[in-house]
Amino acid sequence: MLPPVETDEQWDAVVPDESVMRPGAEALCALLGLDGLPLARFAEGSVPVYAVGGEHVLKLFPAASARDGLVEERVLAFLDGALPIPTPAVRTAGEYVNGWRYVLMSRLHGEGLAPAWPRIPGADRERIARDCGEALAALHALDAGPLAGTLAPGDWAAFLARQRASAVDRQRERELPEAWLEQIPEFLAAAPLPASAQQALLHTEFMREHLITDPAGGWRLTGLIDFEPAMTGDPAYDLVAVGLFTTRADPHLLGQLLAAYGRVFEPRLLMAYALLHVYSHLPWYLRELKPSARTLDDLAEEWFGVA
């Protein structure tokens, strides 16, 4: 039995605590007819995720993020077999106890692209970048109409207006230095944001940490996971995580990816979306990528330019 988790305090007390989480996960597995299979929690992830035997993954969503569980369930079901990169198949999903939701899905085999990256030869990295571009193009080409009502934000222009209005305050809360903060209003005012945007299905966190590769298969991509932050909106929004965390400011790799995608994006547009992104954290990006740029315009070219 899992206790209610509806506040940050309850989250901090319950979600990391395996003495609480594991019995609840085991009880749910028994209800699903999977009792007796080995249960191992993955270290990564903001919500509890367990490998159940060798073929299943159980993802648990407390009440505080129950909507994310519903999004993951419906997007994965919608995507089944639709992309050139495999995505998990939904085995079953639903409500558990005290507001918790669960998604039981197929397990995609391989290892995370992020930890594997240092061992991957350069030619294979380029091919992976091209494969990512093809997968994103396929994702964005889908008709997301069947997901209407499930995915935020609904009104893309209103979403951007809210994000723009709070952009400086959100970065100040993350302790971005004033020299960067003072550039944000003017940069966003001049950014080439489209007046209206294609309502594409967006992963929003398309990054090495959410991609799986198989070294035994020649470093082919064997999985794309974690769709609970999915949205609909401008396809360019998805290129933020790509440029920062997949190609990681490598202009050649980003060029390979976008050539396969079939479109080149204006760097200032992607930098604007980096500031407007739901999870935008410019101080973290600066620490991770250590750019030489000292203006947002130069940063746009350094992080999102192509070669």
Image (cartoon, grey):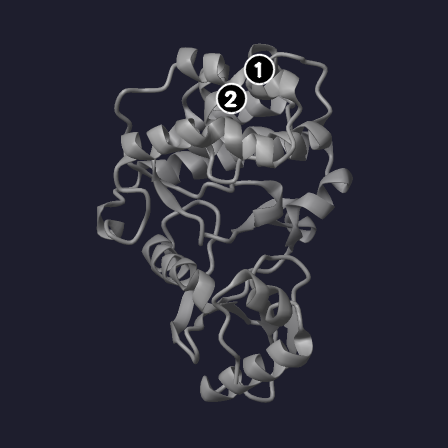
How many residues crowd around disc 1 within 10 Å: few (fewer than 14), some, or many (20 or more)?
Answer: some
> Residue 277 in the image: x percent, y percent?
47, 34
Q: Are marks 1 and 2 in contact (CB under 8 Å)?
A: yes
In front: 164, or 150? 164
In front: 111, or 277? 277
> Residue 305 in the image: x percent, y percent?
56, 15
SS at circle 1 = helix
* Relative horizontal placement of residue 164, taking residue 209 as reference (left or right): left
- Disc 1 marks which residue? 296
* Relative horizontal placement of residue 285, taking residue 138 as reference (left or right): right
> Residue 225 in the image: x percent, y percent?
51, 53
Q: Quadrant of residue 263?
A: top left
Image: 180 above or below 140:
above
How far separated are the C-alphas under marks 1 and 2?
8 Å
Q: Residue furthest right?
A: 119
Image: 300 above or below 109:
above
Q: Residue at x 43, y 80 (%)?
A: 97
How many residues crowd around disc 2 within 10 Å: few (fewer than 14), some, or many (20 or more)?
Answer: many
Q: Please report whichever mark, 1 or 2, sits nearer to the chain's N-terminal start.
A: 2
Q: Nearer the viewer, mark 1 or mark 2?
A: 1
- Determine if residue 220 is in view: yes
- The amino acid sitting under disc 1 is Leu
Q: Residue at x 52, y 79 (%)?
A: 3
- Determine if residue 218 is in view: no
Q: Residue at x 26, y 24 (%)?
A: 196
- Disc 2 marks which residue? 271
